[in-house]
Amino acid sequence: MNKVKYTKRGNMGYLYIFPWILGFLIFQLYPLGASLYYSFTEYNITGTPTFIGFKNYVTMFSSDSLFYTSLGNTLKYVFLSLPMKIITALIVAVILNQKLKGINFYRTVYYIPSIFGGSVAISILWRFLFMDGGLVNRMLNGLGMTSVPWLSSPNYSLFTLSLLSVWQFGSSMVLFLAALKQVPEDLYEAALIDGAGAVRMFFKITLPMITAVLFFNILMQLVNAFQDFTGAFVITNGGPLNSTYLYALKLYDEAFKYFKMGYASALSWVLFVIILIFTAIFFRFSEAATYYEDGGNF
C-alpha cells in the first residue's frame, strides 16, 4: 500500500518538473549538442552544414590573429574588472552593514545599478559620459584638469569599459552583506577585549568568516566577465584599434556579421573550455583557502 502511495507521489513529482525538463532539453541540451556538431562544420545558416573536421579549430589557432587579440583583451578585462568589482562590493557591504538611520534606503539605492547596469541604455549613457566632450571630461576641465581620452585612446578604453562592469556590483554586495550578518558578534566582542582594532578584526575575523561567499562571488563574476558583450559592442564596438575587441564580440561578429556559424560555434566551445579550466583551478585553490563552519567544502 505504501509502495503504491509513494509511487503515485513520485510520478506526480515528475509531472511537476516536466515543464523544466522540456525547457532544458529544448533550450539548453539541444543547442549545446548542436553547437558542438556545428563547430566541426562549415555552416552559414541558410545552407546545409558541411563537415570539415577540425578545420575551424586549426584556423582559429594558426591564422586568425583577431582570435588572439580578442582573447588577450578579454583576459586583461577579466583581471582588471574582477578585483575592482569584488573589492568595491565588499567595501560597500561593510559600510551598509553598520547600524545607521535609514540604512535600508541606502542598501536599495546601491543595489539599483545592478538592475540596469548591463542594459543597452546604460551602455549608451556610459558612452556619452566618457566621450571626449562628455560630462566626465567637463567636470575635469571645471577642476582645471585636462581632458582624458577615455574611449578614443587604446591606453584608457579597456579601463573605461571595466568601470561599467564595476558599477554593477550590487548582486555581489547583497551576498557579502548577507554573509556579514552571519558573522558571530561574540568574536568581535572577544577581539575588542583583547584590544584588537577595526582593521585587524576585519582581516582576522570578518574576511576569514566570509571566504565561502567571497570565493562564490569571485567565481560567478569571473564567468560573467569572460562573457561580457554589451559594453564592448555598444560603447566602443571593439575600438579604438581593437583595444576593446573582447572575445564575445569576436564570436558575435563571426556568427551574425560574417554568418560563419560553424566557426562561431568553435569559438564558443573554446571559450567554454577556457572558463572550465579557470573554474577547475579556482575550485582547487578554494578548497584550501575557504572556511566553512561545518568543515565542508564546495
Image (cartoon, rainbow, N blue to C red):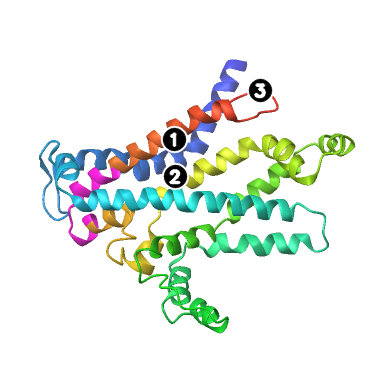
Q: Residue at x 15, y 53 (%)?
A: 44
Residue denoted by label 2: 223
Q: Specify the segment rendered in magenta.
A: 254-268
Q: Residue at x 14, y 56 (%)?
A: 46
Counting residues from the start of the chain, the first of labels 2 and 3 encountered is: 2
The one of 84 and 284 positioned closer to us in this rendering = 84
Q: Is residue 189 above or below residue 74?
A: above
Residue denoted by label 3: 295
Crowding around mark 3 (Cα neighbors within 10 Å: few <14, some 14 to 19, many 20+) is few
In the figure, is residue 11 to the left or right of 268? right
In the figure, is residue 165 to the left or right of 105? left
128 magenta-colored: no
Name which residue type carries label 2: Val
Residue 201: quadrant of the picture: top right
The one of 239 and 12 positioned closer to us in this rendering = 239
Residue denoted by label 1: 279
**Numbered circle sitting on residue 123:** none
